[in-house]
Amino acid sequence: MIIVRVDVFKKDFKKLPSEIQGRIEKQLGLLISNPRHPSLQVKRMNDPRDIRELRVTGSYRLTFQMGKNTYILRRVGTHDILKKP
């Protein structure tokens, strides 16, 4: 699978502490190698665009869509990003 980061995701990512950025990269590695890994806690959101959320830490989430052989990373941050995935 290929990971594509949209511009909003890139902006969100840059604002985060380096520790959280490291956790995100770790979780993305797990997503590629084992998308059903329990620590990811991937859930489908109630959104017509078929957006999913992934757990980075207890307080941070990442939203993404799945394309053919692609994960499209949309947003990353605290739970507040789930309001506008």
Image: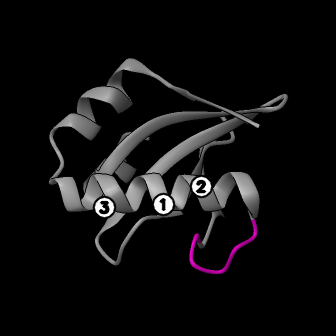
Q: What is the distance, in whole Å, between disc 1 and disc 3 at their CAs?
A: 19 Å
Query: Outermost residue toward the right?
Result: 68
Please report the residue visible at 30 percent of the width from the left and 61 percent of the height from the top.
79
Please report the residue visible at 34 percent of the width from the left and 78 percent of the height from the top.
58
Using the image as rendered, state which of residue 1 and residue 53 is in the foreground: 1
Disc 1 and disc 2 in contact, CB within 8 angstroms? yes
Disc 3, SS: helix
> How far from the left and from the top, in percent, is residue 11?
25, 28
Disc 2 and disc 3 in contact, CB within 8 angstroms? no
Instruction: Please name the residue that numbered disc 2 is placed on.
Output: 29
In this figure, which colouring scheme has been used for the structure? one colour
Q: In which quadrant is the N terminus drawn?
A: top right
Instruction: Please name the residue that numbered disc 3 is placed on.
Output: 79
Q: In which quadrant is the C terminus drawn?
A: top left
Camera sees residue 59? yes
Q: Is residue 67 left or right of residue 71?
A: right
Amino acid type for the residue under numbered disc 2: Gly
Amino acid type for the residue under numbered disc 3: His
Camera sees residue 45? no
Which stretch is magenta? Answer: 36-40
Q: Is residue 50 left or right of residue 57?
A: right
Question: Mark 1 vs mark 3: which is more N-terminal?
Answer: 1
Q: What is the distance, in whole Å, between disc 1 and disc 2 at their CAs?
A: 5 Å
Q: Nearer the viewer, mark 2 or mark 3?
A: 2
Residue 38 in the magenta stretch? The answer is yes
Amino acid type for the residue under numbered disc 1: Lys
Disc 2, SS: helix
User: Total of numbered circles in the picture?
Assistant: 3
Query: Outermost residue toward the top?
Result: 7
Residue 26: mark in rendering? 1
Q: Residues within 10 Å of mark 1 (few under 14, many from 20)?
A: few
Magenta stretch: dominant SS? loop
